[in-house]
Amino acid sequence: MPIFDYACLTFYDLSDYLNTKLQRLFHVLVRFIFGLRRDATLRPYLEELHCLSMADRRKYFLAMLTWRVLQTGRPGYLDQRLRRLDATIRRSARLAGNHPGVFDIRRCRTNAYAGSFSRSLMTLWESLPGSVRRHRREGGFRAALLAYLAEDR
């Protein structure tokens, strides 16, 4: 499985076609591990392995990277690209709702920025519920994130 996770953040925003191909390749790996026939159902074996889908695995790694950048400010080149909300600017409580954001995610003018790594990172972080984002220890954040992604299946 580490081969599937290696550099998975570089292809975070895959098309549905490529994501399906990658998921099917992952299913071949699961069949190989358990010695299953091609027509065998995989759900019980995936649950036994506690595996997330390939898209959710990439979300997991991206969220963990975001958490580390927010906690430590490292790597610096990513920390500089994240546009945090300025606390001195008054924001409407009605617009913010009950989900105060961390990042200033601006509207996209180009497709290149819409698919950029830093925007994907900020968008994913803002989509996580506050109960997941509020953890200050890595272990607690990891457990809450895995539980959230597993229930989302």
Image: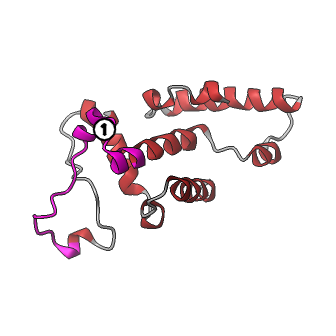
Magenta span contains residue 87:
yes
Quadrant of image for the N terminus:
top right
Residue 44, given in percent of the width and then of the height, sits at: 82, 47
Q: Which element carries disc 1, helix, strand or loop?
A: helix
Q: In the image, is residue 101 above or below residue 83?
A: below
Q: In the image, is residue 56 above or below residue 153?
A: above
Residue 25, given in percent of the width and then of the height, sits at: 68, 26
Residue holding disc 1: 118
Identified at 51% across, 30% down, the residue is 8
Identified at 54% across, 27% down, the residue is 18
Residue 13, given in percent of the width and then of the height, sits at: 43, 34
Colour scheme: secondary structure
Identified at 22% across, 52% down, the residue is 84
Identified at 20% across, 48% down, the residue is 106
Q: Nearer the viewer, residue 74 or 151?
A: 74
Give left or right: position of 106 versus 78: left
Give left or right: position of 146 versus 88: right
Give left or right: position of 69 versus 105: right
- Camera sees residue 92: yes
Magenta span contains residue 88:
yes
**Residue 98 lies in what quarter of the image?**
bottom left
Please give the range of residues in magenta: 67-94
Amino acid type indicated by mark 1: Ser
- Camera sees residue 115: no
Residue 58, given in percent of the width and then of the height, sits at: 52, 38
- How many other residues sit within 10 Å of disc 1, few (<14), some (14-19) or many (≥20)? some
Q: In the image, is residue 95 above or below residue 56?
A: below
**Residue 97 lies in what quarter of the image?**
bottom left
